[in-house]
Amino acid sequence: MSTALHSTALLTDRYELTMVDAALRSGTAGRECIFEVFARRLPDGRHYGVVAGTGRLLEAIADFRFQDAELAYLRDNDVVDAATLDWLANYSFSGNIWGYREGDTYFPGSPILVVEGTFAEAVILETLTLSVLNYDSAVASAAARMVSAADGRPLAEMGSRRANEHAAVAAARAAFIVGFGATSNLEAGRRWGIPTMGTAAHSFTLLHDSEEAAFRAQVDALGPGTTLLVDTYDIPAAVELAVKVAGTGLGAVRIDSGDLPAQVAAVRRQLDSLGATKTRITVTNDLDEYTIAALRAAPVDSYGVGTSVVTGSGFPAAGFVYKLVAHRDAAGDWVSVAKKSQDKATIAGRKYPVRSLRGSVASAETIYVDEPSTATSGERQLLVQLVTGGVADERYLGAAGTTLAREHHEEAIAELPDEAFRLGRGEPVIPTVYA
């Protein structure tokens, strides 16, 4: 369980509480319900999505408590009545949650989270659940494409200045889960155990009386294995200075501007001619999966990605919705329910998803409705129990849970057909089939 001191209870929309208020009045608040989280479609051109944010969500749900400050705000602003305030004062989620393991891949219709509980205790988690999963999964889905485009070369997440301070930490975690090796964000390192990296920006060079003085100061502080930024002024002159100051054992140079394929090739030739044959080249400069793929033939050793990763490379939300699919009626019988709205229709009934496999390669997202699959071979069960009776499975929490998600992602991504990793536009790489 999280040890955070601050409640997450007001990280929600007002209508979640007014629904609880009205349901308590009508006597329906205690009906057992099943809610599911799923995406109707993938972002345009994406062949798969990646589930991320689960560990963060479980901790946020544990902290979803209405303390004196939250209750006072609701009372002072007449959000709900006195009876509902009393109910909220005693609230803690006591139901069950099932979900795809964090780091797994998903497809349209995939019920990545299944929440079981009374209407009141489950519906109140809608906004919090969607705000965490929509952002983190969008980042993870984009970052996974960058990892495949990098073709084994290391990537570092460095987008903190392009997101709000809390999203920056979440983005670093999501990118790490899908294969980024490090982050520039220290809070992400502290909270989730992610390796951190970083040396100097252009301002450090501009501060000094000369570029050589800046390089000497950095090498004196961090050693010759550091990474020197060589594009503040003239790149060839800076590369020569970098090797002069640090020696041929210079760790790396970073290029943050210009025609990267041409610049990288020229810098590699220059470094080799100076005897710095083991000095690595890292590039930054507004990279995304497409520019990373375009650099495959260039002698790049590693990448630093900022804006594109923290914004989901153009799709900052995964498009998940949180929908009621079944509930008990007044007689206590289960009733499957669904929206029939145009373009927003849903499928009634609890879903039991499996990944259908041909050998070791995914062939379909098969979703059984109301009854789980009885198959024992050729299918991988996708749901695991995350919360039992309101208590989260500790394996999925904290830094250890983040590492576990990273390990699971490696297994899940390996199941996908090769077409999944093409960057051209197309449909989901496997179909969603309802059984």
Image (cartoon, helix red, strand yellow):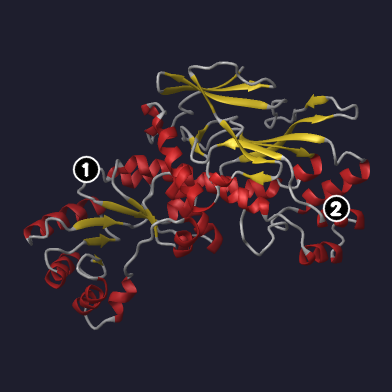
Say which residue appears at 52% left-offset and 41% top-offset.
102
* Figure quadrant of residue 305: bottom left
Mark 2 or mark 1: whose residue is earlier in sequence: 2
The quarter in which the C terminus is drawn is: top right
Residue underneath mark 1: 297
**Helix, strand or loop status at disc 1:** loop
Do labels 2 and 1 touch, CB within 8 Å? no
Any part of residue 316 in sight: no
Query: In the image, residue 190 lies at what x, y percent?
Result: 47, 62
Would you say 140 lies left or right of 317 here? left
Q: Residues within 10 Å of mark 2 (few under 14, many from 20)?
A: some
Would you say 120 lies left or right of 188 here? right
Query: In the image, residue 163 lies at what x, y percent?
Result: 51, 60
**Helix, strand or loop status at disc 2:** helix
Q: Where 23 falls versus 42 (above or below)?
A: below
- Say which of 282 and 398 sits in front: 398
Single out the mark in the foreground, 2 or 1.
2
Query: In the image, residue 115 lies at what x, y percent?
Result: 69, 38
* Figure quadrant of residue 32: top right
Say which residue appears at 46% left-offset and 32% top-offset.
47
Residue 223, numbered label: none
Would you say 57 lies left or right of 199 here? right
* Figure quadrant of residue 336: top right
Say which residue appears at 90% left-offset and 56% top-offset.
81
Q: How many numbered marks are there?
A: 2
- Say which of 381 and 289 sits in front: 381
Q: Amino acid at mark 1?
A: Ala
> Real-space Cα distance between discs 2 and 1?
62 Å
Query: In the image, residue 332 lies at what x, y percent?
Result: 87, 28
